Image (cartoon, rainbow, N blue to C red):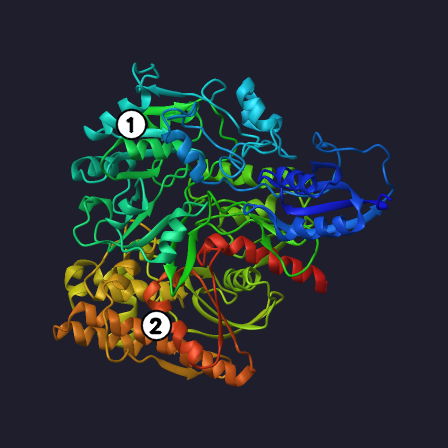
Amino acid sequence: MSPRLERRRLRVRGTVQGVGFRPFVHRLATSLGLTGAIGNDHAGVWCEVQGPSDRLDEFVQAVSKDAPPLARVESVVVESIEVVDDDDEFVIRRSDVDGSAATISIPPDVAMCPGCRSDIDDVDDRRFRYAFTCCADCGPRYTVVQTLPYDRERTSMSEFPMCPACGEEYASPGDRRFHAQATCCPNCGPTLTLLDLDGRDVAGDPLETVAHRLGSGSIVAVKGVGGFQLLCRAADDAVVAELRGRKHRDEKPFALLVDSLDAARELIEADPITERALSGPEAPIVLAPRVAGAPVAASVAPGNELLGVMLPATPLHALLARAVPFSLVCTSGNRSEEPIAVDDDELDRLRDIADLVLTHDRRIERRADDSVGQVVLGQFQLLRRARGYAPRPVRLSSDGPTVLGVGAELKNTVCLAVGTEAHLSVHLGDLEHPLTVAVFEHAIADQITMARATPELVVHDLHPEYISTKFATTQDLAPTLGVQHHHAHLASCLAEHGVEGPAIGVMFDGLGWGDDGTIWGGEFLVGDVTGYERAGHVATVAMPGLAQAIREPWRMAVAHLVAAFDGDLPECGVLRRHQDRVDDVTALCSTSIRTSSMGRVFDAVAALCNLSDTVSYEGQAAIMLEQRAGEHASGYGWEIRDDGECLVADAAPVIRQVVSDIGQGVGVDLVAGAFHRGVAEMVADTCTRLHQRTGITTIALSGGVFQNRRLVELLVPRLDGLGLTTLRHAQVPPNDGGISLGQVAVGRARLAVG
C-alpha cells in the first residue's frame, strides 16, 4: 500500500535569491523522492512539496539546516495545502514578478570559488583565462541585479544570451552552474577590451598587454565588479608617487593586490583569522602589520606600519595578479573624495590618471568599493562595509515599521529597516563632493524601489549642515526625526548584537553635534535604543578654527595647552614650530566652539609628540600615534571628577605629563604607549563608577577611535577583568559607516513608544 501523500507550501525569507538556494532545494527534494515546485518572488522563495509525511518533515528541517553557505534563511513558514494529482516531478518555476511584498535581500557579490579558479587555470577548459567565469557558488550579484526576483533577465547579464553549452550546464541539476544566473563563457560574453586614452582599441591580447605595461611602469584603469580600479607596480616608488600626484592622494595608504596567501605572507604578518578573512567569499582588504623588508615602495603606505592586502575577488583580478611577478597597488578608480567611476562614459574622470583602460561590456548596476577590515583581539572587524558584505542585512531583534536612516556626513551609508532586517548600503563615501551626493540620493531611491516599501520615518543626524540632514529635512517621503550622533553610535552597536539595552556606551570619535551646542566626541552614555543620559564626557576644550583644527592637529595641541596650563604656555616643540601663529590661535580659544572629542585629544598628543602637525586624511595623526605606542609600566593619569550631573574626564594632567616627558627626552614610543594605556585605564575607571551607580554590566564601544587596535587591546581585557560584558563592532564599522543602522534602530524604538 502506497504511503498517504501530503502537500505543504513553504515561504522562505532571507538571503535566498542568487545564492544557489533553488538548485539546493531541487536536489534535496529529488533525493527524498518528493515532487512539487519552487520559485522566486518579491517576498523571497516559495516552495510547494508533496510526498509522505515523514519525508516532508525531513525536507522542511533540511531547508534551514543544510542551506547553501551563501544563503541566510531568516524564517520558514509552512502550511498544509491540497494534494495535486499526477504531480510527478520537482521543478524550478519561472519567477513571479508581481506582488507587493517587501524584500530587498539581494545577495552580495561573492569572490571567485576554487572550482572557477581551477577552470580559468585549466588549458583544456573552455573557460581557460576567461575573466567572467562564475557559478552558483561565486560571482556578481549585487552589482549586476536590476530588480527582484533575481533572475538573469533582470540583471545586466540579460544582454548576453547563453550559448548551448552554458544552457546545458544551467539546466543540469548535477552541475554547479545549475540555475546560476550569471553563467557565461567566451562564446556568450561579456568580453574584455583594452583602450588607449582616446578610446581607441589597443591591439593584442588585453591581459598580456596590461601585464607588460604594468611591468614597465604604467598606471592601468581596470573595470572591476563594482567600478573601476587603478593598478600599478607596488614596488616602483616612482610610479606609486606618480599615481599619488595624479589622484591627488597625498599620504593615505594604498591597498595591495596579490595572487595568493603565500604572496600575502611575504608582505604582512598573517595570523589564521587574517588568512580566513583574506581567502573568504567576501575577499576584503585586510590591514595587518607589514613584514620587515616587504618588497613594497615606501610611498604605498608612508609612515604606516600596516599594509592593506587583498586576494583576487574576480577571475579578472586573478588573471592580472598571476600575469605579473610582483604585487600591485589596487585602489579605487577616482580622484580623492569622488565616487568610484563605474561606466565607460565616466572615463573622462580617469583620463588624467590612467595610461590605458581595461574595460568590458557588462554594465555595473551599482557601485561597490572594496571592503576593508582588520583583526583585533581575535575578531575580524570591518572598517568599510562594501563589496562582499553589503547589502547583507543586519538581523533586528524585533519586527517594526519601515524606517530610513540617511547616515552622517563622512563615510556615509544609508539604511532601510524592513520587517526584521536592516538593509545597510555599501560605503557611499564622504558627502563633501557633488558626485557623491548624487550617489547618496540614488542609493536611497534604489533601496526604496527594491523594498517596494515607503518609509514611515526618515531619521537624520542633528548636525544642521550635514548634506544628509538637509536631504532628510527637505524630502517629502515621510516625517523626520533628528537623532544625536553618539546615541546613533550606541544604537548601532546594540543593534548589531541584537540587543536593545540598557548599556553604558563609550562613544569616542572626532565629532558629533551635541545637545548642548558643543561638539561632542568623548561620551559616556547610559541608555538604550530609545533614549540616553549623558553620564560622562571628556572635559571640553576650544576647537580653534573648527575644520582647520581637524586638518591641523597642532591647533588642538595649542587648545589643550591653554586648558592644561591656564594660558601660561610652556616651552615645547609645537609652539616653536608655529610661533608666528600661536597668539592668533590662542586668542581663538576664547571664542571658538568647545569640544569633548577624544579624537581631537589623540590629535593634540600626536602634535605634542612631534609626529603630525597637519594631516592629509581623516585619522592620520591618531594612526601615527597608535603605531608608535610601545609598552609602558603605567599610563598617564586622567582627572575624573563628578560635577553633580555627570562624570568629567579631564585630559589636563595627561597633557602636562606629555609635555614634561617629551621635554626631558623620553622616547615617543614610551610617551605614546603611556597615553594609550592611560586612556584605557580612564575608560575602565569611568565605566566602573557608572556600573556602580546603575548596576548595568554591558559596555558598548563605538565611534572611530575604536578602530585603534592598541586601545582596544588594552581596554577590553580590563573591562572583562572587572566582570563587565563588552560589545564591540565586527560586521558593522565602528566609525560613521554604522551611523545609519543606529538611526533606524532609534527611529523604530521612538515610533514604538509614540
Q: Residue 530, image x and y in percent?
A: 63, 66
Q: Which mark is residue 280?
A: none
| Observer-nearest of 300 and 666 | 300
SS of the residue under disc 1: loop
Distance (Cα) linking label 1 and label 2:
45 Å
Residue 643 visible: no
| Type of the residue with mark 1 | Asp
Left or right: 414 in relation to 608: right
Question: Dividing the image into 4 quarters, which one contains the C terminus?
Answer: bottom right
Using a 10 Å C-alpha cutoff, classify the residue at mark 1 as few (fewer than 14 neighbours), some (14 to 19) or many (20 or more). Answer: few
Using a 10 Å C-alpha cutoff, classify the residue at mark 2 as few (fewer than 14 neighbours), some (14 to 19) or many (20 or more). Answer: some
Which residue is identified by label 1?
Answer: 352
| Observer-nearest of 150 and 660 | 150
Which residue is identified by label 2?
Answer: 714
The correct choice, above or below, for 639 with respect to 179 in the image is below
SS of the residue under disc 2: helix
The correct choice, above or below, for 344 with respect to 522 in the image is above
| Type of the residue with mark 2 | Leu
Question: Dividing the image into 4 quarters, which one contains the N terminus?
Answer: top right
Number of numbered labels in the structure image? 2
At x 58%, y 23%, the residue is: 168
The correct choice, above or below, for 366 with respect to 647 in the image is above
Left or right: 201 in relation to 656: right
Q: Residue 83, image x and y in percent?
A: 86, 40
The image quarter in which residue 44 lies? top right
At x 56%, y 58%, the residue is: 742
The image quarter in which residue 710 lies? bottom left
| Observer-nearest of 354 and 553 | 354
Q: Earlier in the sequence, mark 1 or mark 2?
A: 1
